Image (cartoon, rainbow, N blue to C red):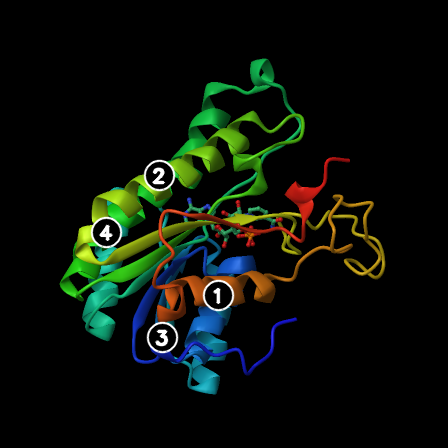
Amino acid sequence: MTRATDRFDSLSGKVALVTGAATGIGRATAERLAASGMAVYGIGGDAEDGAALAASAAASGAPIRFSPVDIRDDAAVRAAVADAVEAFGRLDAVVNAAGVYRTGRRAEEVDEAEWALTLDINLSGTFRVCRAALPELRRAGGGAIVNIASVHALATVPLVPAYAASKGGVLALSRQLALDYAADRIRVNALIVGSVDTRMTRPADAPAGWPESVGLSFSPTAVPRIAQPAELAAVIAFLLSDSASFITGSGLVADGGMTALLF
Ligand SMILES: NC(=O)c1ccc[n+]([C@@H]2O[C@H](COP(=O)([O-])OP(=O)(O)OC[C@H]3O[C@@H](n4cnc5c(N)ncnc54)[C@H](O)[C@@H]3O)[C@@H](O)[C@H]2O)c1
């Protein structure tokens, strides 16, 4: 489990931009990075949750700001990157956690709007944020990016064509950026995530005791439970830190052994 002592001291004094920071893995990441001494500029949808994050950070003295930004809007993304640099003086790290998940349809039932929305947020949104942030990372002398992909980039389950395609794209994009920006001392990795206890996976009619009541019946994993967002935030902090200085272009799997299982 994550321990408060799992600090990555090289993060201290640096600045991170985190998308999807209002909820779930993004929020846990914002809090985790701030606890490691980073200043965090969070963006994303869910303005109310984002305001709650900023308020609790202000109350605890954590340097976290939140700005509601739709990553489908390139001008807004560029403005957010500029604002983060204005607010904190530099940019050293980016975490792309914003995403949407739709399931329940085979390809012929996915209309243009659903396909476009999923790709626009999960893949193109990740691209836009990287494209806007890369010059700032270079200006800072180098940096690191973590893009959240999914086990669907490697293997999949029925009925998630747009989501699976978008996350495969995130993995490929991360490798490409790693190659193209290595000379600028910028590392880029994808985090391949299994099942995590966020609203993305929590059913509206979640049973009492969720997620403890949900063991192997949820998704088969070697570790027989769903992950908590903080467990992914810890891996992201590691990937951003100097402890991961030789890791770039990888798809790091943190799935409790889900993709290790044949049956
Ligand atoms: N929860 C899981 O089991 C799981 C598994 C694999 C991958 N993931 C990925 O992890 C990431 C985080 O998801 P989560 O589980 O924390 O769910 P979540 O729903 O809590 O977080 C998704 C975040 O994305 C933001 N977002 C959505 N559309 C946006 C847009 N157009 N512009 C800006 N922000 C937008 C939302 O506001 C939200 O804060 C996603 O990329 C998701 O695909 C999650």
The vertical placement of 39 against 42, above or below, is below
Q: Position of residue 214 (x, y in %)?
A: 81, 53
**In this figure, which residue is indicated by the disc labeled 3?**
11
Quarter of the figure that contains the N terminus: bottom right
The vertical placement of 115 against 254, above or below, is above
**Residue drawn 42% across the image and 34% down it:** 169
Contact check, label 2 and label 4, Cβ < 8 Å: no
In front of the other: 7 or 78 = 7
Between the C-alphas of marks 2 and 1, the distance is: 21 Å
What amino acid is found at the position of numbered circle 3 in the picture? Leu
Between the C-alphas of marks 4 and 3, the distance is: 19 Å
Between the C-alphas of marks 1 and 3, the distance is: 13 Å
What amino acid is found at the position of numbered circle 2 in the picture? Leu
Horizontal side, residue 2 vs residue 86: left or right? right
In front of the other: 215 or 246 = 246
Q: In the drawing, what numbered circle is on residue 182? A: 4
Q: Earlier in the sequence, mark 2 or mark 1?
A: 1
Give the structural element (helix, strand or loop) at label 3. Answer: helix
Q: Earlier in the sequence, mark 4 or mark 3?
A: 3
What amino acid is found at the position of numbered circle 1 in the picture? Thr
Which marked residue is nearer to the observer: mark 2 or mark 1?
Answer: 2
**In this figure, which residue is indicated by the disc labeled 2?**
173
**Residue drawn 42% across the image and 86% down it:** 61
Q: Specify whether tag 2 is near ligand 1 (CB below 8 Å).
A: no
Between the C-alphas of marks 3 and 2, the distance is: 25 Å
Q: Earlier in the sequence, mark 3 or mark 2?
A: 3
Which marked residue is nearer to the observer: mark 4 or mark 3?
Answer: 4
What amino acid is found at the position of numbered circle 4 in the picture? Ala
